[in-house]
Image: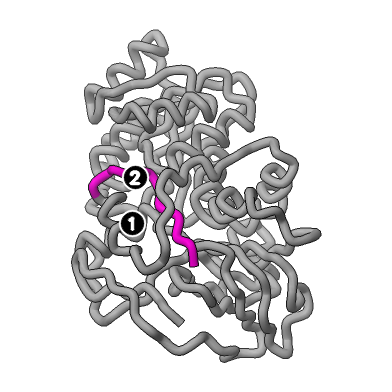
Amino acid sequence: MKATILYGPRDIRVETRDDPKILKPTDAILRLAASCVCGSDLWPYRGAQPAEKPTPMGHEYCGVVEEVGSAVKNVKKGQFVIGSFATSDNTCPHCRHGYQSSCVNREFMLGAQAPLLRVSNADGTLVATRETPDARYIPSLLAVSDVLGTGWFAADAASVKPGSTVVVVGDGAVGLLGVLSAKQMGAERIIAMSRHAKRQQLAREFGATDIVTERGEEGAARIRELTKGIGADSVLECVGTQESMWQAIDATRPGGHTSYVGVPHGVSLDGAKLFFTHVHLHGGPAPVRRYLPQLIDLVLSDRIDPGKVFDLTLPLEKVAEAYKAMDERRAIKALLTV
């Protein structure tokens, strides 16, 4: 099969690799309906996470089960399934508490930018739809597997409540779907921080009531101005830089909640400064598996359309252009036909 391989900074290639095979009795092999590039893929692409060897890329996926291992009982050949970027047995203590992305048997997915994919811990990771969905749902179901699940966790971890004021820091796919998630959870005012007209428009479609273009200290000051000096009840940090983290914390009211789901790079927290904010912090790799049944239902019942974040579609053979377009912010999120 053809597969996407990262060799080094900005060196993405499509190569012929062996088809994946069942390696453990708990594995499943999927034929993917589509693939995509994630914003977090840009960190190794830019060299912020060095690749020590050629690395298969991609961790977002949905598709049809082609084969299952002898121990797999919950999913069957021919079913359409969606999974998480972090596999889980869904039975360990961490899973039972709703943190499947910290499962004691967790494996982080690789290799989903290809037509076939091996998924470990298949029974605890994959959720099947009742029937094979219409093709128009594929982008949204693909979004469920990571960027929507992560945006939803961002809103949940920030304790978004009906009637609350929410700020979203970051206008990538996760941030935009954090706006959608906050809207679904009943937030009354949703302030999206963005400098890009196209992303601002989509944020408003998803439920943003206000747009703030300032960043860093100026951005936090603008939030306080909009909230009469108080700050927001909930702030979703969806970038992962030092500036974005403190911007989020500084925009949160005392007693409010800041979530952080952007993969951190160069982020450190001043304990004394944090101590006096009285801000609740919660985040990490999103436990997408916790939310899969609910989010799949929201998509297939036409209540949400997270697939709108895909604004570029390319064949797998042109995956290098997909990375380049996202790196240069010419695309929010690229969908790959496989």
Visual colour scheme: one colour
Which is more N-terminal, label 2 or label 1?
A: 1
| Crowd band around label 2 with a 10 angstrom C-alpha radius: few (<14), some (14–19), many (20+) | many
Residue positioned 51% across, 40% down in the render = 308
Given the current orientation, which residue lies at the most extreme top position?
228
Q: Secondary structure at mark 1?
A: helix
Relative image position of residue 248 (x, y in whole percent): 35, 33
Along the line of sight, which residue is nearer the eye, 11 or 126?
11
Assess whether residue 237 is covered by the magenta stretch. Answer: no
Along the line of sight, which residue is nearer the eye, 105 or 304?
304
Relative image position of residue 139 (x, y in whole percent): 56, 51
Q: Main secondary structure of the magenta part?
A: loop
Q: What's under tag 2, amino acid-wise? A: Ala
Assess whether residue 333 is covered by the magenta stretch. Answer: yes
Q: Is residue 274 visible?
A: yes
Q: Which residues are magenta?
A: 328-338
Q: Which residue is mark 1?
A: 322
Among the 4 quarters of the image, the one containing residue 220: top left
Q: What's under tag 1, amino acid-wise? A: Ala
Q: Are marks 1 and 2 in contact (CB under 8 Å)?
A: yes
Residue positioned 79% across, 60% down in the render = 131
Q: Which residue is mark 2?
A: 331
Above or below — where is 334 with respect to 201?
below
| Crowd band around label 1 with a 10 angstrom C-alpha radius: few (<14), some (14–19), many (20+) | many
